């Protein structure tokens, strides 16, 4: 083909918008897949050099096999229990007023961001006290690890369960209530229709739990994620760590990919906030009993968290002094979280558009977005260090930026999924109308697209900020010498048993998390209030 | 006979119904006609037990079935409800949707009623399909069959023919009229279309701003 005709054909594909989109999308996938890229490059390099031990990692020792089995079992148990309690709580929430429901959901979102090691600290103190009365209660081991992981993930589990049920059209439930009791309708209509989204919630919780080693390690229970970290620390060979991580990676990837259809059903009805039952469902005594137990567990979770932190951190002076001593770490953590939000959101938006694409292209994008979520946290750090230290990237090692880059790699895909759900809520005809009536792309973006996407941006920003504040597994590996995040400082203190200091810092992280959550929530409220009061959906329709 | 006495209902600060009183005699065929947002659907949902009134009572044959303090569960009211969007359960086949309200009956009777309804509604060929595999018109027929299956004493229709083309709408109007006549159930039909109201009902009640206007 002559060059001129080739360029004539290619030219329409090179519009400014398309080029920017391709560029931003490319950066998103590069940053999200950086750790994997680093590991693969190191693997190939080591393989070519013949320095790779291919056999030992593939034939797990009985200890490693047990670790893998225990880790998967722990994660499955935590995810299963979390979703079960979530289902019970959500079914109880149908009986309360819309305003109270919103307040509880927003509180759950804020609580979900509190790092798991803070729960470890408060529950450890609570269980030690309980152990004095009941000697059978052990302050270490698998049982306490399970309980603390469950407590840490409970707000998220309840929130995701609510999202799963809110995705089921209330009209379908009403249609069933005309024929059968509320309990029968729950089991035959609501639960099966929410099942795919509940499955996705289960998968998310499983992956988060599988990837976390901070809680089990604090309670003396070894998990596979810690083994990966230990292998790397001992050998300093990234490709070997990748090989050891492979079994866990395959399991987590399988879980994430099977979650895909469930995630897509999350946005099947755009009436999340408007849906309500005019006549709240009534359940039999046994189910109400189960709901009451679930409510007690949630109250215990909140009470132990706040009571534990406030009592252990001591007086206000102690809190202020421990906060002042951690000034540098606080500054570094806030700056890191802010940069992660600013870098991730625009990149994630491009990825969200790609996730919406039909056919093979969309499916491929889904796999590329889900893969980074399946990589255990320590492996993300190892891959990142390997890539940026490696000979391929002829750029200076971005030391201070590394904690930002690992958080982008770990959490930008989550922002992409949130923005994908937000995009699905928006009627595409609004974008078509904008294209017809607006002659300027900038105007279309600033006046139509961004305001419509604002709720998704706010939620994603809040979640990214809190996740970054809580990140430990990967940051611990990449943090430059002389610089630590608040989370790292707390984790280090936890091993020394400086309870007052740790509690003060944990209280600070909790306050920061709640502040980030409240900020996002108030902005959302402001956005929704601007659009005026909404009439009940049925009356709008009739 | 269903009697509504002084029913009021608000959603937040938005009043949907204000002091509505209405009597629906046995076998009556009533159409509630009114513009969007006039409170018709809310009234229908209150009769079905899907909403709790803020004030007033709803009685069935003299016994109170709805008041601000007490609401008889919808499943115990012997009422059929045909929703605007058909509201078929996507995880069940057409047959399973229709059989849903018949599980208390012996298997043989269930199958007998299913066969009769499938034939009556002309949906036998699609009985094993899922809702996303049938047309809009077929979905409305399935919704009607599902409501009729338990042989309710009262049938409630919430704009069941919205968004259908003229021919399909006329076919379904005749089907609804004939079926109601045959079953002898009382009927409350909500619509904003005068033609539909005249086709199916003996009595037309006009609704506006949450009250009966005529």
Image (cartoon, coloured by chain):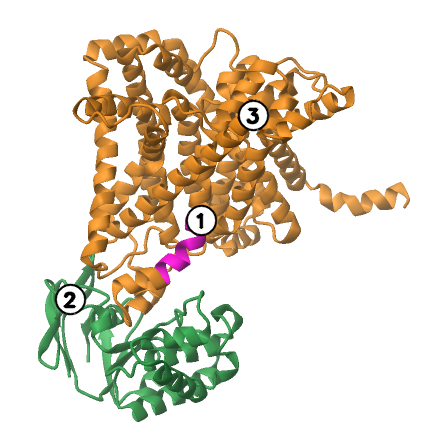
Chain colours: A orange, B green
Is A454 left or right of A158, judged from the image as shown? right
Q: Which residue is mark 2?
A: B71
Q: Quadrant of residue A452?
A: top left
Above or below B146: residue A356: above
**Structural crowding at the residue carrying mark 2, measured as other residues with C-alpha within 10 Å and reported as few (<14), some (14–19) or many (≥20):** many
Chain letter of disc 2 in the image: B
Which segment is the magenta one?
A189-199
Query: Of marks 3 and 1, which one's residue comes earlier in the chain?
Result: 1
How far apart are the two marked residues, 2 and 1, measured between alpha carbons? Answer: 34 Å
Q: Which residue is mark 3?
A: A379
- Nearest the viewer among A500 and A393 is A500
Above or below A431: residue B213: below
**Structural crowding at the residue carrying mark 1, measured as other residues with C-alpha within 10 Å and reported as few (<14), some (14–19) or many (≥20):** many
| Image location of residue B16, percent across then percent down | 21, 64
Residue visible at 29% across and 72% down?
A179
Which numbered tag is attached to residue A199? 1
């Amino acid at each position: 083909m002559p060059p001129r005709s080739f360029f004539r054909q290619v030219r329409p594909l090179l519009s400014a918008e398309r080029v920017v989109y391709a560029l931003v999308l490319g950066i998103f996938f590069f940053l999200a897949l950086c750790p994997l890229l680093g590991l693969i490059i190191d693997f190939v390099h080591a393989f070519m050099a013949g320095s790779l031990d291919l056999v030992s990692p593939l034939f797990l020792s009985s200890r490693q096999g047990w670790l893998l089995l225990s880790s998967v079992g722990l994660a499955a148990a935590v995810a299963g229990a979390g979703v079960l309690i979530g289902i019970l709580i959500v079914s109880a929430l149908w009986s309360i007023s819309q305003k109270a429901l919103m307040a509880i959901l927003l509180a759950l979102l804020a609580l979900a961001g509190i790092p798991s090691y803070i729960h470890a600290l408060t529950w450890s103190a609570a269980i030690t006290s309980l152990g004095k009365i009941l000697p059978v209660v052990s302050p270490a081991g698998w049982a306490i690890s399970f309980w603390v992981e469950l407590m840490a993930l409970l707000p998220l589990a309840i929130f995701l369960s609510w999202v799963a049920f809110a995705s089921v059209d209330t009209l379908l439930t009403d249609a069933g209530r005309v024929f059968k009791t509320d309990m029968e309708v729950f089991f035959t209509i609501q639960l099966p229709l929410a099942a795919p989204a509940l499955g996705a919630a289960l998968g998310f919780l499983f992956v988060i739990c599988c990837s976390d080693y901070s809680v089990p390690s604090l309670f003396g229970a070894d998990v596979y994620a810690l083994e990966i970290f230990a292998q790397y620390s001992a050998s300093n060979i990234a490709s070997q760590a990748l090989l050891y991580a492979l079994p866990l990676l395959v399991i987590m990837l399988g879980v994430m990919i099977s979650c895909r259809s469930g995630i897509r059903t999350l946005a099947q009805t755009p009436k999340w906030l408007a849906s309500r039952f005019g006549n709240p469902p009534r359940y039999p005594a046994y189910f109400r009993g189960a709901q009451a137990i679930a409510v007690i567990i949630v109250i215990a979770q909140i009470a132990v968290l706040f009571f534990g932190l406030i009592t252990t951190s001591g007086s206000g002076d102690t809190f202020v002094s421990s906060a002042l001593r951690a000034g540098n770490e606080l500054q570094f953590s806030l700056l890191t979280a802010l940069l992660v939000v600013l870098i991730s959101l625009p990149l994630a938006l491009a990825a969200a558009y790609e996730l919406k694409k039909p056919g093979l292209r969309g499916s491929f994008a889904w796999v590329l977005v889900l893969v980074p979520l399946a990589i255990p946290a320590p492996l993300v750090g190892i891959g990142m260090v390997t890539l940026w230290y490696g000979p391929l990237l002829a750029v200076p090692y971005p030391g201070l930026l590394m904690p930002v880059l690992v958080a982008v790699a770990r959490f930008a895909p989550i922002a992409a999924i949130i923005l994908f759900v937000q995009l699905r809520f928006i009627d595409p005809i609004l974008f078509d109308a904008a294209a017809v009536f607006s002659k300027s792309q900038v105007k279309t973006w600033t006046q139509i697209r961004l305001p419509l996407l604002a709720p998704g941006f706010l939620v994603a920003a809040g979640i990214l900020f809190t996740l970054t504040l809580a990140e430990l597994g990967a940051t611990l590996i990449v943090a430059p010498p002389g610089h630590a995040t608040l989370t790292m400082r707390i984790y280090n203190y936890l091993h020394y048993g400086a309870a007052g200091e740790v509690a003060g810092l944990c209280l600070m992280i909790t306050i920061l998390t709640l502040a980030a959550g409240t900020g996002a929530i108030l902005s959302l409220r402001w956005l929704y209030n601007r659009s005026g009061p909404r009439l009940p959906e049925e009356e709008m329709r009739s | 006979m269903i009697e509504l006495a002084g029913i009021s209902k608000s959603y937040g600060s938005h009043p949907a119904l204000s002091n509505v009183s209405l009597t629906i005699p046995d076998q009556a065929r009533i159409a509630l006609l009114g513009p969007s947002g006039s409170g018709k659907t809310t009234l229908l949902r209150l009769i079905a037990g899907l909403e709790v009134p803020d004030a007033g009572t709803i009685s069935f044959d003299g016994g109170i079935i709805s008041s601000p303090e007490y609401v008889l569960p919808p499943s115990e009211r012997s009422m059929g409800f045909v929703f605007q969007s058909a509201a078929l359960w996507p995880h069940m086949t057409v047959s399973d949707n229709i059989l849903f309200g018949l599980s208390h009956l012996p298997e043989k009777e269930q199958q007998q009623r299913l066969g009769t309804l499938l034939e009556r509604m002309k949906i036998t060929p699609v009985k094993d399909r899922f809702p996303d595999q049938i047309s809009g018109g077929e979905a409305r027929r399935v919704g009607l069959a599902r409501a009729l299956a338990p042989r309710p004493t009262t049938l409630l229709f919430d704009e069941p023919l919205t968004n259908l083309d003229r021919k399909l709408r006329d076919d379904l109007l005749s089907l609804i009229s004939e079926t109601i006549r045959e079953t002898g159930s009382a009927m409350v039909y909500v619509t904003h279309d005068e033609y539909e109201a005249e086709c199916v009902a003996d009595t037309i009640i006009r609704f506006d701003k949450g009250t009966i206007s005529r």
